[in-house]
Amino acid sequence: MDAPLETRGVDLGSKIARLVEERGWNQEDFARSSGLNRHTVREIMNSNGERKLRNDTISKCAKALGLQVNELRDLPLDRLLPRMHGKVLSEREGGRKLLLEKSEMPELKEWVSRNTERAAQITVEEAEELLSLQGPDGVLARIGVEYYVEILERRRRLLNRVKAIAKSEYFDLLEQFVGLLYEKIPSHK
């Protein structure tokens, strides 16, 4: 039913521990956020890659971290940089910081302040896109910050899924499908 899973590459427990650390959470914070008991969280955080995780546990961890399960599995270790104690900012932390520093729209600044978890997921590239859409007649003013961020989040999920498919036995099918869709886009011709 909920058998232990073999994991690809870096152990999921190690990834989860690094992501929890990046967010500045302690084990109790993560237990509360994920709905897991403290004993399970402690084992994940201190497993050093030795603990196999169950499907339900992985799902709860991913949800608490604001990720899909496949995003958690495929997230490369080099994207997991410590964010605490004055260490280098990750690309995503840099995106949030860029929005806070360069946003001219009060609505955008308010959105970042109200949505700290979601704002922490914004990459530098996405932040630059948001900043380019500011202004009284800009896209953000017309359709709203929340709606546009939802588009960015959907795009990010889609790209992560495409990356996962590209690593699978369905790569050839994906390549054909993308080729057909690409031919439909007027801007590439």
Image (cartoon, helix red, strand yellow):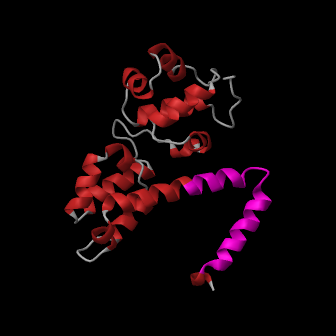
x then y, percent, for residue 163:
65, 54
Location of residue 30 with respect to 70 vertically, above or below: above
In the foreground, 15 or 105: 105
Determine the residue positioned at 71% across, 73% down. Answer: 180
Magenta residues: mostly which secondary structure?
Answer: helix
Asked if residue 115 can be seen in this view, the reply is yes
Give the left or right position of residue 132, taking residue 2 as reference.
left
Q: Is residue 153 magenta?
A: no
- In the rendered image, residue 74, in percent from the top left (x then y), is placed at 61, 44
Q: Residue at x 25, y 73 (%)?
A: 135
Looking at the image, the residue that sits furthest to the left is 106
Apparent side of residue 93 relative to residue 75 in the rendered image (left or right): left
| Residue 176 locus on image (x, y percent) | 76, 67
Rendered position, 73 above or below 99: above
Numbered marks: total? 0
| Residue at 49%, 13% in the rendered image | 39
Write down the region rendered in magenta: 158-185
Quadrant position of residue 99: bottom left
Q: Is residue 19 visible?
A: no
Question: For the view shown, which residue lies furthest in the bottom direction?
Answer: 189
State yes or no: residue 164 in magenta. yes
Which part of the image, by quadrant, shows the C terminus? bottom right
Q: Residue at x 38, y 55 (%)?
A: 95
Which residue is at the far top?
Answer: 39
What is the x, y in percent for residue 102?
Answer: 26, 63
Quarter of the image for residue 146 reads: bottom left
Q: Quadrant of residue 32?
A: top left
Quadrant position of the N terminus in the picture: top right
